[in-house]
Image: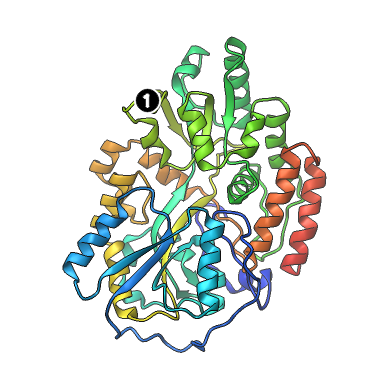
Amino acid sequence: MATHRRGLSRRTVLGASAGAAAALGLAACGGGSDDAGGSDSGGAAADFSERGPITLAKGKDTTGKLQEFLDAWNTDHPDEKVTLVELPESSDEQRSNLLNNAQAKSDAYTVLGLDVVWTAEFAANQWVVELPKDKFPLDTLIPSTVETATYFDKLYGVPFMTNAQLLFSRKDLLEAAGYTEAPKTFDEMYQIIEKVKGANPDQLGYGGQFSKYEGLTCAVTGIVKSAGGELFDDQGKPHADSKQAIAGLQTLRNGFDQDYIPQEALTYKEEESRQAFQDGRLVFLTNWPYVFEKFQADDGSSQVKDKVLVSLVPAVTGDGVSTLGGLNFGISAFAKNKGTAVDFIAYMVAEERQKEWAIATAQPTAAESVYEDADVIAQFPFFPQLKDAIDKGVSRPQVVKYGDVTQAIQENAYSCISGSTEAKAAMTDLQKTLTEVAGK
């Protein structure tokens, strides 16, 4: 998927697998059953007349801002209060919790915080209800974000956040090495690292999310796309063994083999890689925008304050491509007070709160106006670049049996970058597994 994420078409969904599904968001396959589970909703229209207290179940809020939004809602709606149910920080554990709740047909969770690649599973199994489009300001949201919440042309979620990764560079080290701009390709980046390390052998080069979890799926999806390849085409057919896909993975392997990427990066997730860059140990880092505020901290916790250059992620050839993330709000099919839930979601995605969230958290929201807002840009000058990264980004495979797919990507890619398997063999094995999963 090239410029924008697309909605889940009938061909893409059915091409992945007929019947039971397992999906996964931002971390590795979390032990949930691939059993369809089903629901007792039978596809009937949801009852949005019920009102009363509800819960919001989502991953741990590390911003501190979410509770402010909930407090404001609760003050204005004393009989329809929202209680935050914080799920674990790990996305595989989040999915496991949501899956267990759905299979138990529990009403404990009302509004669900869903990763953008969970739509197919939750909608196909009727674990979330179709939403009334006219109740939400969909025309103010980035169209591609709305498509991530759409299944068979029906709305099953409303986008709250989107996300794209960026390249963070140590501009002081670049300047010392004779460079004024961030690298546009991996080859350029590796050349700069070699020059920087020549003057300081202890300086580490490039960091990203290379541990065996969902972050590695994001890394591989983006780099394969930037090499001119794709893991799946629009028909749901895998192409992991194409020469372009192999070249993408080989680029990462080269980085490890030549010490441009340190071996410790094999354990990096978002926070480990962020900390290494923030401590001044890395020249370059690919990560999500939330890290920028931490880099600019003036409490002594950051060694890179005012030393960070922000740009698009590097490419193998052509433009750098970020794998996209994001969070959609859905409503559990088993919840009470769905009418209140609809109004609460509309409240959360209103433009004024989208702007407030972006300014407070540095996290990219789904509202288009945020990326042109003078107040936002004054605080985060890279937001126009971030919108460019979102527009050029690529989705992770939008397939129903996503859990099996992401696990296969992680296992084969990690085997390669850790030195156990060569790139061609790893991608050949991956192609075989994806073909079996997709039924192609």
Q: Is residue 81 above or below residue 353?
A: below
Which percent across, then down, holds residue 297?
34, 31
Which percent across, then down, holds residue 186?
62, 31
Q: Residue at x 31, y 70 (%)?
A: 136
Q: Is 254 or 114 nearer to us in this picture? A: 114
In the displayed structure image, the side of residue 346 where residue 315 appears, left or right: right
Q: Is 293 or 195 nearer to us in this picture? A: 293
Q: Is residue 192 above or below residue 362?
A: above
Q: Residue at x 45, y 73 (%)?
A: 156
Q: Is residue 196 above or below residue 72?
A: above
Q: Total of numbered circles in the picture?
A: 1
Q: Residue furthest left?
A: 76
Q: Secondary structure at mark 1?
A: loop
Q: Residue furthest top?
A: 199
Res. 183 image quadrant: top right
Image color mode: rainbow
Q: Is 385 or 194 nearer to us in this picture? A: 194
Residue that carries the numbered disc 1 in the rendered image: 305
Q: Residues within 10 Å of mark 1 (few under 14, many from 20)?
A: some
Q: In which quadrant of the rendered image does the C terminus lie?
A: bottom right
Q: Is residue 25 visible?
A: no
Q: Is residue 151 above or below residue 389?
A: below
Q: Is residue 220 visible?
A: yes
Amino acid at dot 1:
Lys
Res. 11 image quadrant: bottom right
Which percent across, then down, holds residue 340?
29, 76
Q: Residue at x 64, y 70 (%)?
A: 33
Q: In which quadrant of the rendered image does the N terminus lie?
A: bottom right
Q: Residue at x 23, y 56 (%)?
A: 352
Q: Is 307 or 301 nearer to us in this picture? A: 301
In the displayed structure image, the side of residue 156 where residue 133 appears, left or right: left
